[in-house]
Amino acid sequence: MEEISGLPLQRLMKTGPRRELQGTHAAQLAIFALSVGLLRAVTEETGYQPDAVCGHSLGQFSALVAAGVMDLDAGTQLVNHRGLLMDRQNQRHDGAMLAVSGLATDVLASYLQDRDAAWLANDNAPGQLIVSGEKNSLDHLQTDLKANGITCVALDVAGAYHSPLIGNAARAFADHIAATTFRDPVCPVIANTDATLLTTSEQVREELARHMLAPVKWRETMLRVRDLGITRGIEIGAGRTMKGLWIRNHSDLQCLTSNDHRDLTSTIKSLSKLTEAEAEPA
């Protein structure tokens, strides 16, 4: 990964400095590297194979690796280009993102109607929405929402992701998508943009072409997981944010995590028992 990106990722992830690691380019590569590393630790240790995979925004790329659509090098190439292009685009716009709690999507849409440079970026869960746009526009939106008693918090991000403000980056990224060889997934990949099941390489290519600009429909993604009859999920990566969103959308879902060594060890132990039980003759 370091040869592809030209970044000292191991040093940055171990010792920082934090300021360099938080840059869009480095941060995306570090998150991807950690996710794929944890994925390998879980699957190689347990032999566990998922019935379907999904990933939130950047997480879609590690999900594609999990589904065998591309290998680590191809994934790193794409994430490297994505991070660089988005970082450059961030320099051209004073972009921001705002988390809004307790509103339905149609109510939020009424606040966004006729408002310049503000768009729905993530529909994460009932009452958990993210808006993306120009900082000045989001500042005014935040004022209006708070005046009506609505909770909203500015996110610590460097740009207006999943919005038209990164259109130039998305168009340039399309060339890299076109040049990448994809394989058919070994299990369905649930699309971020519309929660459909991606089962061919061409469907993956079409999804990635829309991915950078389209809103992340995570609530619909979790409903798709429920409709598939899946009752166990594994959050691969740092933190437990996805677990919280999964449970809010699909309360019957048991979610294992890999946030730290204790979580990872517990998850590996649980999955090892599961695969052993499934391997036993009936």
Image: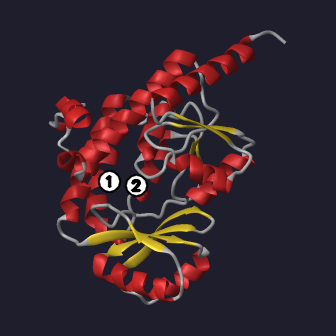
**Quarter-of-image position of residue 40:** top left
Q: Position of residue 101 (x, y in %)?
A: 54, 71
Q: Is residue 131 left or right of residue 15?
A: right
Q: Is residue 85 above or below residue 150?
A: above
From the viewer's side, name the closer residue of 149 and 57: 149
Q: Is residue 216 left or right of residue 250?
A: left
For the residues bearing labels 1 and 2, Cβ distance under 8 angstroms: yes
Tell me which colouring the rendered structure shows.
secondary structure
| Residue found at the far top of this picture | 281
Judged from the image, the secondary structure of the residue bearing numbered disc 1 is: helix
**Quarter-of-image position of residue 38:** top left
The amino acid type of the residue labelled 1 equals: Ala
Q: Is residue 194 left or right of residue 281?
A: left
Q: Is residue 264 left or right of residue 10?
A: right
- Residue for point 48% across, 50% down: 56
How busy is the neighbourhood of tag 2: few (under 14 within 10 Å), some, or many (20 plus)?
some
From the viewer's side, name the closer residue of 24 and 199: 24
- Residue for point 54% across, 51% down: 191
Q: Position of residue 162 (x, y in %)?
A: 39, 63
Q: Earlier in the sequence, mark 1 or mark 2?
A: 1
How busy is the neighbourhood of tag 1: few (under 14 within 10 Å), some, or many (20 plus)?
some
Q: Is residue 91 above or below residue 14?
A: below
- Residue for point 58% across, 53% down: 245
Q: Which mark is residue 50?
A: none
Quarter of the image with the C terminus is top right
Q: Position of residue 160 (x, y in %)?
A: 33, 67
**Quarter-of-image position of residue 139:** bottom left
The residue carrying mark 2 is: 209
Q: Position of residue 201 (x, y in %)?
A: 48, 40
The residue carrying mark 1 is: 174
- Residue for point 67% across, 17% down: 273
